[in-house]
Amino acid sequence: MPTVFVTGANRGLGYEHVKQYAHKGWKIIACAREPEKANKLQELCGEYGDNFIIEQLDVVNHSDIDKLSRKFKNTPIDILINNAGTSGPLGMPGAMAYQTIDNMDYEIWRNILEVNLLSPFKVATAFHNHIAQSEKKLLVMMSSDLGSVEQNTFGGFYSYRASKAALNIISKGMSVDWKDLSVIALAPGWCKTYLGGKEAEIQPDESVEKQQDMFEKITSKNSGMFLDRFGKEVSW
């Protein structure tokens, strides 16, 4: 059976990915910072047994990432979804307040860059070989439309935008350096998650369903692209 590895699997899009892939019969490696508090994740683990593995992982802890990489060194990972991300201590719209041009919290910005940029780079490099030895060989970097320079027509969101635009850059670079797998940056749409807020347009399960359909169509020709959940290219 194919294997999917998901960071930030305890809620939102990450949880939907592991839930839907589990229903499809995949082997799941679901990572969460505090799995003991992730009740819904634990329920899935109870339902699917040995095919559903929960791992404790704080993505800012690089030594823990390395330990996990070594633990699964003989496990091919068909799809790795670098999903863990943050907009700071608040989701939208509250997160807008501390990342404006005239009110910037630099400590929060540093944390956002640590989680949204450095951590996915570290996870990707630590698990590159696991992905490369699989059948599907797909690395998904969870980005955002807010990371698009061309689509930035109303300003604001400086910290979050910067982290996702930079994530797009490293995704593209990985596609150049790694010819043995496919790397895409993904804009999932504005989803009703903790990060996206209640005013968002798309239910997480609907977005993830489209994402997973799109993943099945990805080939090496798509590596280095910035795509939406339907597989359409997003402007850089």
Image: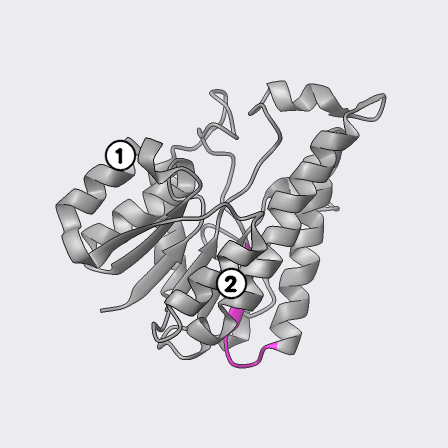
Image check: 174 left or right of 187?
right
Q: In the rendered image, which quarter is residue 122 located in?
A: bottom right
- Residue found 36% across the figure and 55% down from its top: 212
Q: How far is mark 1 from mark 2, CA to CA?
A: 27 Å
Q: Secondary structure at mark 1?
A: helix
Residue at the disc numbered 1: 40
Front in this rendered view, residue 209 or 97: 97
Vertical side of 49 occupied by 184: above or below: below
Taking the magenta stretch, the answer to whether it contains residue 41 is no
Q: Position of residue 37 (x, y in %)?
A: 34, 31
Q: Quadrant of the N terminus?
A: bottom left
Q: Secondary structure at mark 2?
A: helix
The reply to whether residue 236 is visible in this rendering is no
Read off the magenta span: 178-185
Q: Position of residue 52 (x, y in %)?
A: 23, 53
Residue at the disc numbered 2: 66
The reply to whether residue 167 is visible in this rendering is yes
Vertical side of 229 occupied by 225: above or below: below
Tell me the tag on residue 212.
none
Taking the magenta stretch, the answer to whether it contains residue 179 is yes
Image check: 58 left or right of 154?
left
Q: Which kind of residue does numbered mark 1 sit on?
A: Lys
Q: Position of residue 115 (x, y in %)?
A: 61, 44
Q: Which kind of residue does numbered mark 2 sit on?
A: Asp
Image check: 167 left or right of 230?
right
Crowd band around label 1 with a 10 angstrom C-alpha radius: few (<14), some (14–19), many (20+): some
Q: In the rendered image, which quarter is residue 138 located in?
A: bottom left
- Residue found 57% across the figure and 67% down from its top: 125
Nearer mark to the viewer, of 1 and 2: 2
**Earlier sequence position, callout 1 versus callout 2:** 1
Crowd band around label 2 with a 10 angstrom C-alpha radius: few (<14), some (14–19), many (20+): some
